Image: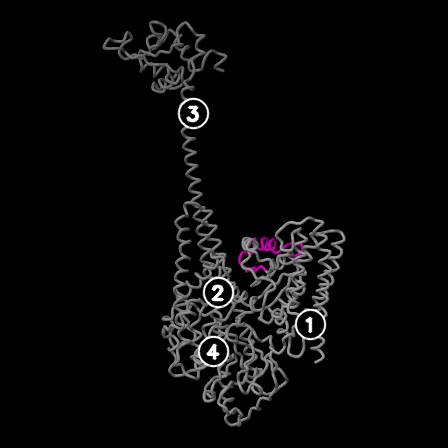
Amino acid sequence: MPSTPSPTPHSVRSNDEERVPSPNSDLIDHETFDQLLEMDDDDDHDFSKSIVWNYFEQAETTFGSMDKALEVRDLDELSKLGHFLKGSSAAIGLTKVKASCEKMQHFGNMKDETGTNTISEDDAITKISTLLEKVKDEYKEAETYLKNFYKERDDS
Amino acid sequence: MSNTSGGPDFVKKLFKMLEDESYSDIVSWGINGDSFVVKEIDAFTKTILPRHFKHSNFASFVRQLNKYDFHKIRNSDDSNSPYGEQAWEFHHPKFQCDKRDQLDNIKRKTPANQKKLVSNTVNDISNMTHITELQSQVNNLTKLQTNMNDHLHALSKNYHSVIQDLINFQKNMIAQDQLMQNLVQYLVNLEAEKSGSYNNGHHSSTSGENMTTPFIPSDQAQKLINSYTEVARASFDQMNEISRRAQSIHHIANSEMNNSGSSLSDSSAITSNEPLELLTLRSNLSDDNIGNINTSASSESVSPKNYISPQSISVASQSAETINISNEYSQNISDTMINLQPSDNGLTVLTVGHLTPRQSQSSPLPIAISNNNGNSSIPHIDNTSPQRASNTMRVHRSTFVPAWSVPPKVLLVDDDAVYQNIGSKFLQVFGCAIDIAVDGISAVNKMNFEKYDLVLMDIVLPNLDGVEATTRIRRFDPNTPIISMTSNTTKQECIKYLSHGMNDILAKPFTKANLLSMLERYCMHLKVMPNFQNIPRPLGTADRPIATIPNNSLISSDLTDDNLSENWISNSLAMAGDNSYPFTVLSGDDYMQMVSNVVNTSNNGTRYLEGNDDNQNQRSRKKPKFELVE
């Protein structure tokens, strides 16, 4: 009888080892982000990286649109853009950006940040101008963090 | 002519005749000049009538007089007529001896006659209308009858084609099952060879645990698997076809009921009752089957040579740990291309088909897939074994496929590239075929051209929002489940989604687990039965009572069995009526029969089928394997 070769040993890296170190717990929702990482192949992060880079692109386009909409005081558009970026930020797990986008969605609807009370148009525009700068900062922070994260992974 | 020359010819002739004095003995004016008297009928008939009226028929003469409204004057009482007993005296108010000019006014009794005639005509007309009515009624009835005949004809034609399809389908199933049989046999042989070689080949596994048998997707096995998939797919399509046809029958029946009015109400009542009865019948049957199938899983006295080792199952049910099948069983355990380890309350994941080693290794590697304490739907690698470093293999993720009999086809509607990518990836991992629409309009268009098993619909979309898109889709597709994918999950919004025809809500950002649970809920009909045998099974073994299954028959050939046909039809009809899925996988006992046959152990032929109502099966029993999702 032919003998079957014995299995060659090799190591297995569990998904749990791939947890993201978390300096800012409110910046990223790790449960969500880990879920993306889990979908990666073993040897690279091509999938999650493509998602994240895709998000960067989309976010920057959206910020551009927000700037324009703010210039022409198009609250409706701002609300829609807020909603849009809220969605993709949530998908990545960018908690802060998501929260700010949600506020923008409300302001765009001329509501306060909880979405319950009505505010004036001028008030909404003012709030959005401030918020837009803030959300851009939050985005930068997340971008830097994520880019570092992937850089470390690629290096290791 | 009668107008210009003073009265009708007959009257003129009569007058002229009376002017002739030579006839006075035979016929003459009456005493008062307002009547005339025929004194000698014989002479009158023989001599005068021929001369003046060109005939010799007194009765005819009298009839003519009557026509002109002359009246015979009866002799009153017993007093004799002044002209003799034989005399006939005729009178007309305008026929007088000295008033020739009045003759013009003597007319045939046409008016009276015509009135009579008219009234007759009126009668005739009403009769005619009556007849016409009757005729049209008869026509209608005939037409109705023809329609009915046509309808019956169509029905029987459809019925025949359905039966034909069933037969074809059964043929496919036989082919399928034979393939399965070949496959199983092949694997059994392979295993026999393998275990032999393990024993002879100084295998390093001395600890007596973690015996998992290797599986090589050799060419032959691969071919078998592929052809099996093909056959399964064909069967599936055919089943769809069958249910479509049954649906159209249902439609015909419905429209017939509506059109034919009261005269058909009896038959329509029958038609509408029937599916109900059949449905009930079917649900009874499936209940029975579920019970029996569940008990079979717990039957411990099945031979270890079974395709899926019953030991592994019973071990698994006793312990939530992953199983280490001891070495002593290894000789008997069939090589399972599906190597699974059920845990207490979790999802059982099994892999089918291509397993690729993580690294390029030519040697076969044992696979151990387990479920992580049941709370996660993400399968991961068995790492409880002390030998895991050497004995386990990393299975590529894309092989972690829930046990679909046919991959669900999912339409993902989202304008956000991030969601498109994540959603696609998840769905791909779950073994789905994916299509993407980026706005509401293209979603509607895609739904128009393709059949999907599930739609994941974002709400805020360019061009046409998800709610409106769903409304439009529902106009032509009431069945396909549409899941609202949204970050706005307030109660009010959810009610709005559901009221516009969406079936469920998947909150954004969705997790892998949430998405999977949606898939499993709405694509249940595409899943391999979770409780039955943990191996892929043929799609369409019939749903019927176990008692009718002949033991040890591979595929029972009683195609014409009434129960069988009825169940099939009732399934389709029930589905058509219930707005539910066009296809339901039926439970299959024949398959179990087949498996046991293939493995061919001496004593297990009937074991599976014995009712053995363990309490531990109650939970799974409550959950029907194939639900008609509404």
Horizontal side of residue A148 vs B92, given as left or right:
right
Label 4 resides on the chain identified as B
* Rendering coords of residue A41 (x, y %): 64, 76
Q: Can you give x and y, in whole percent of width and height, for residue A128 in the image? A: 71, 55
Query: Is B616 left, or right, of B40 in this rendering?
Result: right
The residue drawn where x is 43% and y is 75% is B592
Amino acid type, callout 4: Ala
Which residue is denoted by mark 3 in the rendering? B118
Q: What crowding class fits label 2: few (fewer than 14 Cα within 10 Å), some (14-19), or many (20 or more)?
A: many
Residue at label 2? B584
The image position of residue B336, as x and y in percent, is 50, 81
- Which numbered mark, 3 or 1, is in the foreground of this view? 1
The reply to whether dot 4 and dot 1 touch (C-beta < 8 Å) is: no
Mark 3 vs mark 4: which is more N-terminal?
A: 3
Amino acid carrying label 3: it is Val
Q: Residue at x 40, y 12 (%)?
A: B14
Task: Name above or below for residue A96 compared with residue B20.
Answer: below
Would you name the residue on which mark 1 appears?
Answer: A49
